Amino acid sequence: MREPLLIAKDLCRTWSTQGRRVEALRHVSVSVEAGETLGLVGPSGCGKSTLARVLTRLVPPDAGTIRFRDADWLSLSGHRLRAERRFMQMVFQDPVGAFNPRATVSGAIADPLRVHELAGSKDQLLRVGELLERVGLSPDLASRPIRDLSGGQRQRVALARAIACQPQLLILDEAVSALDLAVRRTILELLVDLQRETGMAMIFIAHDLAAVKAVSHRIAVMEAGEIVETGPAETLVAAPQSVTARALVAAVPRLPSV
Amino acid sequence: MAEQPLLRVDHLGVRYAASHAAALEDVSLSLMKGERLALIGESGSGKSTFARAIAHLLPPGAARSGDITWLALEAPPEAGRDLAFVLQDPSASLDPVMTIGEQVAEGAVAHLGLSWGEAYAHAATLLARVQLPEPEHLLKAYPHQLSGGQRQRVAIAAALAAGPSILIADEVTSALDRIVEAEIVALLDGLVRDEAMTLIFITHDIALAAKLADRISVFADGRLVEDAPAAQLLARPQAEATQRLLSAHMDLSTPSLLREVP
Amino acid sequence: MGMMARLLRTRSGLIGACLLLVMALAALAAPVLFPGDPLAIAGPAFLPPLADTAFPLGTDSLGRDVLAGLFHGARASLAVGLAAALAALLVGLVVGTVAGFAGGWVDEVLMRITDAFQVIPRFLLALAFVSVLGGSMTTVVIAIALSSWTEPARLVRAEVLSIRERDYAAAARVIGMHPAEIAFREILPIALPPVLALSAIIVAAAIMIESALSFLGFGDPNIVTWGSMMAEGRNVLRSAPFLSVVPGIALLVTVLAVYLVSEGVNTALNNNQAVPRG
């Protein structure tokens, strides 16, 4: 049996500021198989974003191990780490802050192509056009400054940038939370489509259980730095065990039956 | 005899100073006293502009055409006194260098003529009303010490300090997680019912609108495209924008988007 | 460039830029309008201004043309001022970016070095440098740069520290960009605008330090600068005040122009209002 794509064990991370200590992660363990989507859901402050940052090595854990693609992820450094990074990419929550304020659409999407030498400068424009179409945007947008785009368009560009280097794992940290519901749905459909096509695994982080359930195979529920429940998406939602999961289920607004 | 509406808007148009397109065009609607109206639409559809226009809170340089008539009041309503306006981002309505007590008591001092001592006592009552724990301690705390949901409750308390009869809530839960959102919505529901307030609730989530409101008005591209009682709008949506908002709704009964479910 | 257009739309920016343009033209035109050595004796000594049409601003104690000196002095002052400011900015930008981005002990070491330079009063540092190494255009430029790099360094570091925390800097790391590329390609250009506003002040200060050094006799003895003209005029201040006042006014106007441009840059930077949505 193949090892899962990502195995994180016993991750711990504490933030201490001005005498206050917050345990953002308390012995968190998650695993993701190739090609599956793990939904990570919980109220704000539960540690989901910290987990995303620890997994992508933006922040070092205080303790714990991570195995990614059959290798010790945390021990990599320098050139080897930068090369391996192409296989784990992330889409951020804030469509505004996720881009250099001066960037153009093609500049941003070409960055990973350039960094990992996946396309010569002539081919880059071609690839950028392909990627734009893949995420449902017109290739004409390539020369536009990202400033000019709407939130939904920016997240599509962020997706294009994230899949440009063909990652095996895509982490989405509240990537649709700042978007309108109408736009949200189309982005979720796009995500599922991309996964079907590329076979990449995803970790979908959100506070909205409905969005998580729509795209996830399995769901992990977090509360106060710990994973309190995991299970297949349908089962967990149908019969939530933990207090947090039940509160999340109850909090999803339903349309009154008409 | 037909009751007079509280607010009547006729052919309202708004254009912002630096923009080519109109933010609002030819919007007419009326609001009865005690009614709960939800304004829904995608971002940029004009719903927030409408709320600011009727509260006379448009930025300087914005051009307005058409009529806004508040019938049951002698003068146009003043934010704070007659009108409670709560925004999406509590950091925009709460001053980071003033204590919570000061900010909640301010409205009472300014519009009810209470002394600061009386106003602080009133503020403590309000903070308890919005279900914040230990109100007396909170009076001396600062906004940055609270969570997003708590800050939003403070913003609501501050807006209600002078006892206004009209509450305008502009995307007040969009920045909060679902659990806190549900609590804030329940809070607003209770407050509006207990104080017999008139409510204008702005959101892009049609399910939230249906939860709180009797009537729903749908905005798209600066125009009012549909206006109907909530049940009717959900059962028989007419406008394309309404149908789009309905199909964008996702809850736990929505089938998974994955082709094979394990 | 959008920035330039915005700058010229502000009143102070426009006036300042015009004045600087006049100064720059004077500096460039100097060898054309006044060929030959401005330090050569041209006429009778102590001619007052407007007495002789050949010497509109008169002559100094040795009979040298004051107007020629003024124009040639513009060359020296502007050249030294700009070169020194540029050097100071480059050093400051590199130090500030490396310190802010690397953090840790690199930051500590660089900041202690910055502290050390900052503790010494600016002018004394420049003075010490030229008095040891002699006064020439090059040493004067280096001296002024040494005394001026700490401010841009601190400013850039502060900007970099805040920008470093933004999502797009994190995104660059996740993509796998090399830290040097992130620091100098992604972060530094965004950190630049406040430093540009500061650069105008650095130029002004550089011009003044140069004049002061020349005035004290530490500048390059082979060229005319406004400072050296004022030094010469100092001895005859009672009888021929115009010899000190004229270069003094030129200095004043130039520094004022630079400050006005810096005001304009600040105003232009802050005039970016967003249109409300929704």
Image: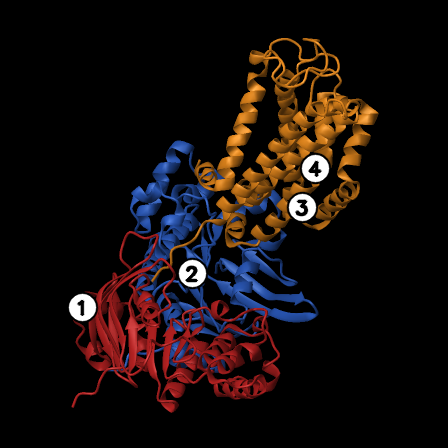
**Chain A in the picture: what colour?**
blue
Quadrant (top left, top right, bottom left, bottom right) of the N terminus of chain C: top left
Which chain letter matches label 1?
Answer: B
SS class of the residue under badge 3? Answer: helix
Colour approach in the figure: by chain
Q: Nearer the viewer, residue C17 or A65?
A: C17
**Residue appearing at x 24%, y 80% in the figure:** B230
Residue located at (52% from left, 33% from top) = C17
Query: Residue tagged by mark 1?
Result: B239
Q: Which residue type carries mark 4?
A: Ser
The part of the image, by quadrant, that contains residue B177 is bottom left
How far is mark 4 from mark 1, CA to CA?
66 Å
Mark carried by residue A162: none
In the drawing, what numbered circle is on residue A175? Answer: 2
Q: Nearer the viewer, mark 2 or mark 3?
A: 3
The chain under label 3 reads C
What residue is rendered at 30% in x and 43% in y? A139
Question: Camera-side residue: C123 or B247?
Answer: C123
Q: Are marks 1 and 2 in contact (CB under 8 Å)?
A: no
Q: Which chain is red?
A: B
Closer mark to the observer between disc 4 and disc 1: 4
User: Regarding mark 1 in the picture, which secondary structure is present there?
Assistant: loop
Graded by Cα atoms within 10 Å as few (under 14), some (14 to 19) or many (20 or more), the crowding at tag 1 reads some
